Amino acid sequence: VPSPPARGHNVTSQRAALCPTSTCPPPCRHCLVPQPISSLSPCRTGLVLVRNPHLDLMEEDILYHLDLGTKTHNLPAMFGDIKFVCVGGSPNRMRAFAQFMRRELGLAGAGEDVADICAGSDRYAMYRAGPVLSISHGMGIPSISIMLHELIKLLHHAKCRDVTIIRIGTSGGLGIEAGSVVITDMAVDSSFRPRFEQVVLDDVVVRSTELDKDLAEELLTCSRDIPDFPTLIGHTMCTYDFYEGQGRLDGALCSFSSEKKLDYLRRAYEAGVRNIEMESTAFAALCGLCGLKAAVVCVALLDRLQGDQIRASHEVLWEYQQRPQRLIAAFIRKRLGLVRTD
């Protein structure tokens, strides 16, 4: 087994380790050294990759926060035909998205309520609409990270192939009008760097936040058939906090002036940032390492250069939240070769 990576190791630059099992395609479970993302995408078989050799030694894998498991559920039968996974913060929003996708795909029972597959857990909610899985991830990096670990293992155990995963959600815009939809080409941290830092034991591991550029362009092309709201490609800045971390002046704590806030946000805009949220770097890093084609599509609820508080009415905000869903529905219909008749 190769030696573990050194402190501050950047997994995207790690040379591929040679596996003692010559027939095993990279990344091999016999190899503990992480492989570069370039060796993961696309996977030769289209299967979802896991990067944990210990899983092979487990008799059962309990996906605790999803209330699923390899012995208690027939995961290939339940999920083996999933082709699209859409994740978002709110359980109610993801239930509404699943209902929307049932109508969009013309599925039987489209007008009925959808069952929460994770009903035995109060952490996340999961719904199906044909080949589409709709899952909530909560707010922030810790919450989405837990969900993604178990979701990726679920897709792996279910032997899903050629899965596309998309985060749909809300964000604060930067120099763009409220209601604009941003397709992320690069997720960046609070210093505008395309990287995600994960503390593993007492090491800081730096991971790439590269997203699939072809998928982003395909989504932008689909948006041209929906002319009633603006859609653009840009960088998304991911922070660990909604208030201080995003330079807001209206939190319980604030140690900076309005001038410093505006200077920071303008520098972010000059670096290519067009919206701000709290999940994209972890999402991009985990999906990239496991060979999943991933995208982030978020609507801007306001322009942060104009203020901090969201003042739009509930009706307006609800319509804004439909915009990423409409775009993703058009994308999925196009991928499935479905043509609208209405």
Image: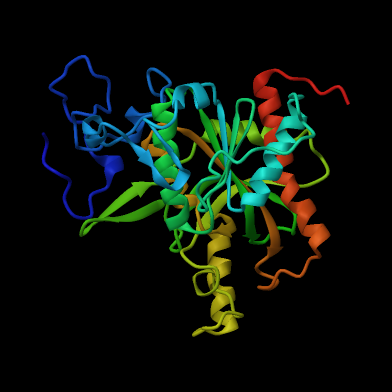
At x 73%, y 26%, the residue is 105
Above or below residue 112? Residue 305 is below
At x 23%, y 55%, the residue is 8
Q: Quadrant of the N terminus?
A: top left
At x 50%, y 51%, the residue is 280
Front in this rendered view, residue 42 or 106: 106
Most extreme residue toward the right, as rendered?
342
Q: Position of residue 92 (x, y in %)?
A: 67, 51
Scheme of image coloration: rainbow
Above or below residue 276? Residue 35 is above
Number of callouts in the render? 0
Above or below residue 161? Residue 251 is below
Q: Position of residue 65 (x, y in %)?
A: 44, 48
> Can the viewer see residue 41 in this picture?
no
Front in this rendered view, residue 78 or 243: 78
Q: Quadrant of the C terminus?
A: top right
Classify residue 328 as left or right of residue 120: right
> Can the viewer see residue 254 in this picture?
yes
Classify residue 197 as left or right of residue 297: left
Q: Position of residue 35 (x, y in %)?
A: 27, 34
Q: Position of residue 222 (x, y in %)?
A: 71, 32
Front in this rendered view, residue 342 or 42: 342
Residue 127 in which image quadrant = top right
Residue 68 in which image quadrant = top left
Above or below residue 265? Residue 208 is above
